[in-house]
């Protein structure tokens, strides 16, 4: 594929299908786990895994920090005809990913229980959360390195291999979840083992790309290490915050729910957060599809093509947003039933939680797409600010203030919609200002 000359519509559709497929299957690792454990252990199982979910966000977001951050610069270098400079970004991203994943995995395994309690697991849930985590923690480097490889391989012109890799891991994970959780009667521990094996398999498939003749990624001697790493982090900080902020939001929600409510509300929220993750994977797919096309055309000075991609991305997210919102509004009980054995207590609170929280889906797609766009044209500061608005600047005050108002815990479910509303105002303002200046 020629990112500089092929028709924009054809390029965007191909990258969109591949990126959405990759992003969607990644969500299967947590979605299928919660479904199986929720059906096996009941609402406590779903609540326990909700406490582990933020850890996936940490490692995946770090992979995006190094992968997308470096791949943007690699594409810009190639657009300007500087192949070796592009390879330098790849090598330094890879080295940083190996070191960072090793350090964090060792630290996580040493302080597993303390981390899980910090994320909301109480005495009732800690046993199930620990049983799941003991198999997942050793394979967390695969989540980081998997995202890193996906970013570079996609920018190197092989998006379909990325989809094939995550589909391989996802299908294997689904099969092993059912087999280990139910047939082998391992419960939460079996789900953790299935997830670890699935992600490891996905990374092995990605590694086969480096055996292909079409692979243009080269391992060279790294130079200007700290300067290059700083540039990678600056460019990748926005997508890093986009994903990490969701894990941060889940952790804050977990703690606030257990403060004002019970494990029943946490189980219902855990279901909605995973439904939202699944839907938002499509928004991430839109952002990841526009990124390589925008970056290389921006580097080559093709502003007209950049504008076309942005228009397609925003139109796509608008259609997705309305569709996902409608699904949750119409079928909340059915969605709860997929994830757990629904008790009368869950049924009493679950549909209301899901319908209120789902309002955020109408706005989050625009915020994610704009953040990726700004990052792709090296507006790193603006992109980071949009991501920070979603992750903490608006969310934290809402989470702590709304429950104090007369409606109590019900206010928590409006925290994310109000956060997305505030963020979309910032995102659209940045977008209009920058389009007038440069695009």
Image: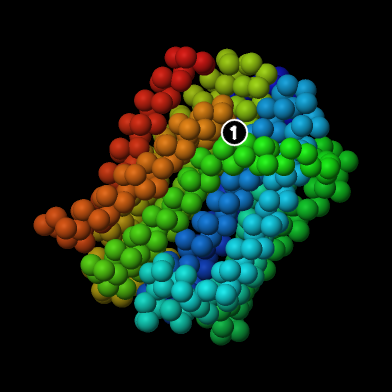
Determine whether, in the image, residue 260 is placed left or right of residue 162: left
Where does the image place residue 135, in percent across and percent down from the top left? 61, 75
Locate the N terminus by quadrant.
top right
* Most distant residue in the bottom direction: 185
**Depth order, front residue of 202/138:** 138
The local secondary structure at tag 1 comes to: helix
Residue 326 visible in the snapshot: no
Q: Read off the residue under disc 1.
A: 291
Figure check: 325 above or below 336: above
* Most distant residue in the right direction: 213
Q: Residue at x 72, y 27 (%)?
A: 77
Residue 56 visible in the snapshot: yes
Determine whether, in the image, residue 290 is placed left or right of residue 429: right
**Depth order, front residue of 140/267:** 140
Where does the image place residue 119, in percent across and percent down from the top left? 41, 67
Q: Residue at x 37, y 81 (%)?
A: 124
Where does the image place residue 414, in percent across and percent down from the top left? 25, 50
Q: Residue at x 69, y 46 (%)?
A: 93
Determine whether, in the image, residue 321 is placed left or right of residue 8: left
Where does the image place residue 72, in percent across and percent down from the top left? 64, 34
Figure check: 310 above or below 117: above
**Depth order, front residue of 281/393:** 393
Q: Residue at x 34, y 60 (%)?
A: 253
Question: How busy is the neighbourhood of tag 1: few (under 14 within 10 Å), some, or many (20 plus)?
Answer: many
């Amino acid at each position: 594929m020629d990112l500089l000359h092929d028709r924009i519509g054809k390029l965007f559709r191909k990258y969109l299908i591949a990126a959405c497929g990759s992003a969607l299957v990644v969500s299967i690792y947590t979605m299928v786990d919660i479904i199986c454990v929720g059906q096996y252990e009941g609402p406590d199982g779903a609540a326990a895994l909700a406490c582990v979910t933020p850890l996936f966000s940490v490692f995946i977001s770090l992979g995006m920090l190094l992968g997308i951050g470096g791949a943007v610069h690699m594409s810009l270098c190639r657009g300007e005809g500087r192949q070796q400079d592009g390879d330098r970004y790849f090598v330094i991203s890879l080295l940083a990913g190996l070191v960072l994943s090793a350090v964090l995995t060792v630290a996580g395994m040493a302080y597993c229980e303390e981390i899980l309690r910090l994320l909301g697991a109480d005495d009732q849930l800690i046993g199930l959360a620990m049983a799941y985590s003991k198999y997942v923690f050793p394979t967390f480097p695969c989540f980081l390195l998997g995202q890193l490889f996906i970013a570079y391989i996609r920018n190197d012109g092989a998006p379909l291999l990325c989809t094939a890799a995550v589909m391989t891991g996802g299908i294997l994970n689904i099969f092993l979840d059912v087999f280990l959780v139910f047939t082998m009667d391992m419960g939460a521990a079996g789900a953790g083992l299935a997830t670890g094996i699935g992600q490891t398999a996905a990374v092995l498939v990605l590694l086969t790309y480096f055996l292909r003749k079409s692979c243009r990624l080269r391992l060279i001697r790294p130079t200007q290490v700290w300067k290059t790493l700083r540039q990678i982090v600056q460019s990748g900080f926005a997508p890093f915050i986009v994903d990490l902020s969701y894990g941060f939001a889940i952790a804050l929600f977990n703690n606030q729910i257990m403060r004002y409510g019970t494990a029943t509300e946490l189980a219902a929220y855990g279901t909605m957060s995973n439904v939202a993750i699944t839907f938002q994977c499509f928004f991430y797919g839109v952002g990841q599809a526009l990124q390589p096309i925008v970056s290389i055309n921006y580097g080559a000075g093709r502003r007209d093509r950049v504008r076309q991609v942005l228009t397609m991305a925003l139109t796509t997210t608008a259609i997705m947003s309305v569709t996902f919102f409608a699904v949750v509004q119409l079928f909340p009980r059915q969605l709860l039933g997929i994830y757990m054995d629904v008790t009368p207590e869950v049924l009493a609170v679950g549909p209301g939680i899901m319908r209120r929280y789902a309002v955020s889906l109408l706005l989050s797609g625009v915020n994610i797409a704009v953040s990726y766009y700004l990052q792709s044209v090296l507006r790193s500061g603006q992109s980071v600010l949009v991501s920070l608005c979603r992750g903490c600047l608006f969310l934290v005050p809402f989470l702590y203030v709304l429950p104090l108002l007369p409606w109590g815990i019900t206010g928590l479910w409006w925290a994310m919609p109000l956060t997305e509303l505030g963020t979309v105002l910032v995102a659209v303002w940045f977008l209009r200002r920058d389009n007038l200046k440069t695009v």
